[in-house]
Image: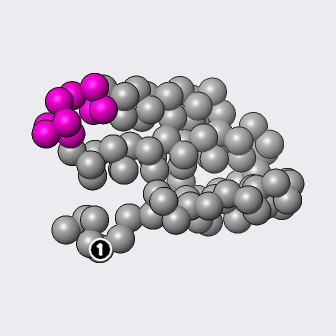
Amino acid sequence: MDTNKTKFAQAEQCLASVQAELNRPAEDIASIVVYRSVQKSITHYLMGFLLKNNTAFDEGAAVEVLLKKHKTFSCKFNNFDLSTITLTKELVG
């Protein structure tokens, strides 16, 4: 089973892949790779927080479901806007 440190490390790896993608020439950047990596990173951070706080979750849960669990810890999580990382059918292709 993953630990919170593992999830946080996975989140950092996703962010590193975003940075590597953004360091490529503009015409070579794959936007979908950036979007997916950012979404994965946020998901791993959310899971890490839940693990750290001994809260059960489904490993395959959507980021919106994970965030809902966070809202039980603090109302500050109500300010998170996930609309910019939610992939639409137009973006996926």
Q: Secondary structure at mark 1?
A: helix
Nearer-the-camera pick, 65 or 75 = 75
Q: What amino acid does circle 1 point to?
A: Lys
Residue 25 lies left or right of residue 14; in this view the side is left
Query: Left or right: where does residue 28 sit relative to residue 72?
Result: left
- 71 within the magenta span: no
Q: Residue at x 17, y 30 (%)?
A: 25
Q: Provide residue 80's location: percent of width, then percent of height.
A: 67, 57
Q: Which of 71 and 2 lies nearest the eye of the viewer?
A: 71
Question: Which of the 4 image quadrants contains residue 23?
Answer: top left
Q: Residue at x 71, y 46 (%)?
A: 50
Would you place residue 32 above or below residue 20 in this image? below
Vertical relation: 71 (above or below) 17: below
- Quadrant where the C terminus sits is bottom left
Q: Which residue is mark 1?
A: 89
How many badges with numbers are in the image?
1
Location of residue 33 with respect to 24 vertically, above or below? below
Residue that lies at the very extreme toward the left in this rendered image: 27
Which sits in the foreground, 1 or 43?
43
Image location of residue 62, percent across then percent down: 52, 63
Q: Residue at x 59, y 65 (%)?
A: 64
Residue at the bottom extreme, as displayed: 89
- The residue lying toward the viewer, choosing from 15 and 62, is 15
Which residues fall within the magenta stretch?
A: 21-29
Measured from the top left, where is residue 73 in percent x and y? 85, 54
Q: Crowdedness of circle 1 by 10 Å Cα count: few (<14), some, many (20+)?
A: few
Q: Name the quadrant of the N terminus.
A: top right
Residue 91 in sight from this viewpoint: yes
Instruction: Return the x and y of residue 53 as percentages of the image width and height.
Output: 80, 42
Residue at point 19%, 36% (across, down)? 26
Q: Quadrant of residue 92?
A: bottom left
Q: Is residue 51 left or right of residue 13?
A: right
